[in-house]
Structures are given as structure tokens and as C-alpha cells.
Amino acid sequence: MRTYQTLQDETNISLNTVESIESFVTEIHQGHWDTVLKVVQPLKLPDKKLMDLYEQIVIELIEMRELGAARSLLRQTEPMLKLKDLDTERYMRLENVLGRNYFDPKEVYLEGGSKEKRRTAIAQQLAGEVSVVPPARLLTLLGQALKWQQVQGLLPPGVQLDLFRGKAAVREQEEETYPTQLFKTIKLGMKSHAECVRFSPDGMCLATGSVDGIIEIWNYLTGKLRKDLKYQAQEQPMMMDSAVLAIAFSRDMELLASGDQNGKIFVWKVQTGVTVRRLEAAHSKGVASLEFSRDNTQILSGSFDYTIKIHGMKSGKSLKEFRGHSSFVNDVHFSADGQFVISAGSDGSVRLWSAKSGECQHTFKPLTTVGVEVPINSVHIHPKNPEQFIICNRTNTMVIMNLQGQIVRYLTSGKRDKGDFICSTTSPRGDWIYAVAEDGVMYCFNAVSEKLERTLTVHEKDVIGVCHHPFQNVMATYAADGILKLWRP
């Protein structure tokens, strides 16, 4: 019963349950009103039935000459006060009976009525309002809820749900390995192709930002839109004024930030599709990269206007601005402890900044040729070693560099024609490093052996990006032909 009471308190929903309907009815028939009132008190019953019940109790108290108790019940309880407002004549009859120095059942129970008949009528009325919950009903309801989530695709088959956190339990033990097969294709169309794609941190869904300004949330297992989100079911998607170039989930999955070609940043409530913050002038040119801080109070952005900014979620204002890149800023990240910001630009540099002061601490140029700056597409802090970062530039070679600016590893496609890398990502624990090149091939590097273990042709048309599931061996690739593909081993 304690669990039942807690459920009612937490949800503000009364379940109108009793331990036994037969016992409840028997108590009414026998006139054990103290017990009946204890049972009725937490229930949500119709006003009329409550007034009938309390009226009968007042009458029987008067009959037993318990006048003090009858007076209190008549004048101080909510059902009787409602009776006074709704049916004054009926209420005054009770006041008159209470004021007499005798009790005559014939005056109280009219037209052949009696105490027993009134009790029977009340018992029948109240029995229809209550039900009995079997002892294991809570577990049954939880099971049905989980089954519904699986049917809707909200809970992938075989994935356990953490009931206390309300999300899928992360299976850290799964051995990381490269993808070998296509298991789902999402066709967005060439005029609405995805410019950015991200899995939610809990791994339950996939978000896309498209060239037509539309942002959508997908069930990646079925390849269909999440229609359990009301705004998507009603075909009223999240939308910006121009092409969406960057998106990022907050760590609690409640918010989604999006940046567009015009330099605007919007923050959306994922469950409702409503904007909770609009940064109309976040940047003067397109927003290429976004990331939430660990506590979700700030948003980091990198832009084609050569700047990096930290924006306050509460104020909606720019809190810090980082200047130093001489070309587009293509990728930005907070360090794991939030003390630093790392950025990659088309000027061929990777920069490390103090998040507190905004000053540039280090500038690295991993690959340079005479008079030519090699654009850097992305930079990733190495999951296995936060002192190292993985740099993907527009050549056929990625590099792993340490904080001293030393290159500790080269990863190359070995291909000169159309072998330049476009985008890259890592597996969650850093066992694998992936890059997709101009030839539409994904190159899978073993981070431990440093060897190229596998190649996989993922697209025929120009590849735009790649992203990895937060804890499963699932990857998404997307291209300019409007095709988004999902891969697994």
C-alpha cells in the first residue's frame, strides 16, 4: 500500500482502489462508518455519491444521539457544505432533524424507505466507483510500458531500460568493432539533404539538420520519424530560416541546439518542438559546429565568421569570444573538464584556448605545404587519451597529435586520387578511428595497432558527414544525394 500511495502522490492521479470490494461493501451494510470514511478519504468520488454517503452518516449519528459528531460532520465537511450550496432545502431538513430532541425514522426515511435500504443503495453506488488492484499489477504495468516502447521503437530490442534513470542502460561491455553492413536507409531527398546528423546521448534517437532548414528526430532502427513526438505527428517540425549546418543535444537529452547558414542559433525542447532560446545574431556567418557544456548552461559555437563563442543559456548572450583563426572555424569542442576549448579551422590550424580567459594557449599546424594552408575538417579529443587529439584534414592522411604539438601517429588512406578525407569520427571508447574520403569509402583504422583494418564503400555521391552511436556499434553516414545510411557489424 505504501508503493500505491507513493504512486498517487507522485502522479497526482487517484486510482480509486480498495483492498477488497466485498469487505468495503460489508462495512457499509454494517454501518461501520469510521472504517468507511478512512477508505473513502483518498478516493476521487462523484460529489452526488459523497453527499448521499455523508447524509446517511449524519442521520445515523443523530439516531444514536451522537449530536456533537453529527453537527461537526454536517457543518464542517466538504460534501455537506456542497449540499448546502446545491440543495439548500435538503440540507435544512438535516438541520431540523438535528435540532429536535427526538428521532422519528418515518420522518427521515420517506416513501417506505429504511436505514437498511439506504445503506444498500449507497453500497451499490460506491462499489461501482472502486476496483481492486492485484498484488503484482505494478510489475505488469511496467512490463506493458516497456513493450509499448519497443513497439514504438523507443527501446531497441534487447536493450535493457534503467527504471531509475528512465533511459536505456548503457552496455559498456560490448566489444567495439567496425561496421560491415547497411541495415537502414533514410531518404531525405537532394533538396532536403542532411547537413548534420547526431545521435542522442542516450542512443535512443537520431537528429538531422537539413539544407532546407528542417530539423527532425528519427527512430534510427526503423528509419522512420518519431511520431510519438506530437509536433512531428502533426507535420510541424522544428525549422530554421536557412540551411541547418550544426546540431547538438544537451547531455540530459531535453534540449537540442541548431545553428544555420545565417549565423543564428536556436535551442529547442525536444519533447515539444518549442524554441526555448533564439540567438538571432549569434554569428555574422554560418554556424559550423555546436556543443553544450557538461552542465547544459552554455553553448559553444564555431563559425564561418572566423570566431568561436560561448553563449549563456540563461541570458542568451555571448559570454566569451575567441579570435585568432584566419579562416572558417569548422569544429569546436570543450575539453572533458570544461577548462579548455579546442578548435579546427580552414586556416590549417588547431587551437587550444582557455575557456575562462578566452586566450589562445597553443596553435598547432599539423600539415603544411609551401604557401598552402591545408583545411582541417574536424578535431576529436582522443577517447583513450585526453592528452591527444585526432585531426582530420583535407588530405589523405589524418594525424594524432599531443598537447606539445608532436605528431604521434599518421593514419593514411594510401590513395592519391580522391583519397582526401572529408569527415571523421571515433568509436565511443576510442578503439577505432573512422574517416570517409572523397571516393565515398570509409576507412576503418585500429587505434591500437594503427593499421587500416577495413574499407567500406558507403556512398556514391559527395559525402557530407559521419557520426557514431554513443555506445553501440552503429554508425550513420550522409551525402549530398539526400541519402542517410545506417551501418553495423
Image (cartoon, grey):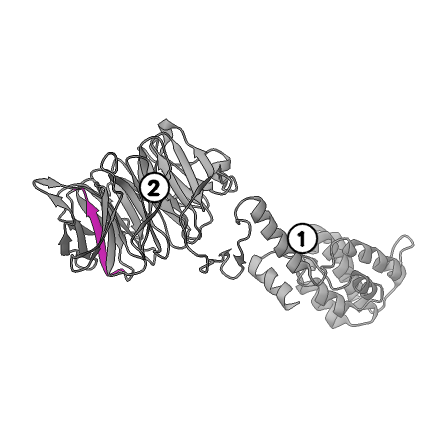
Secondary structure type for disc 2? strand
Picture coordinates of residue 382, whole percent (x, y): 29, 56
Residue, disc 1 = 85
Position of residue 430 in the picture relative to residue 356 (left or right)? right
Residue nearest the viewer, comparing 484 with 139: 484
Q: Residue 209, relative to residue 316: is it above or below?
A: above
| Quarter of the rendering containing residue 126 | bottom right
Q: Residue 361, relative to residue 220: is it above or below?
A: below
Q: Residues within 10 Å of mark 1 (few under 14, many from 20)?
A: few
| Quarter of the rendering containing residue 414 | top left
Residue nearest the viewer, comparing 200 with 64: 200
Residue nearest the viewer, comparing 131 with 55: 131
Amino acid type, label 1: Asp
Q: Is residue 328 magenta?
A: no
Farthest residue to the left: give it. 371
The residue shown at (78%, 56%) is 127
The stretch of residues the image draws in magenta is: 338-346
Determine the main secondary structure of the stretch shown in magenta.
strand
Picture coordinates of residue 339, whole percent (x, y): 24, 61
| Quarter of the rendering containing residue 251 | bottom left
Q: Residues within 10 Å of mark 2 (few under 14, many from 20)?
A: many
Residue, disc 2 = 442
Q: Is residue 13 in view from this perspective?
A: yes
Q: Nearer the viewer, mark 2 or mark 1?
A: 2
Position of residue 465 in the picture relative to residue 485 (left or right)? left
Q: Are marks 2 and 1 in contact (CB under 8 Å)?
A: no
* Pointer 2 or 1: first along the chain: 1
Number of numbered discs overlaid on the protein picture: 2
Secondary structure type for disc 1? helix
Farthest residue to the right: give it. 112
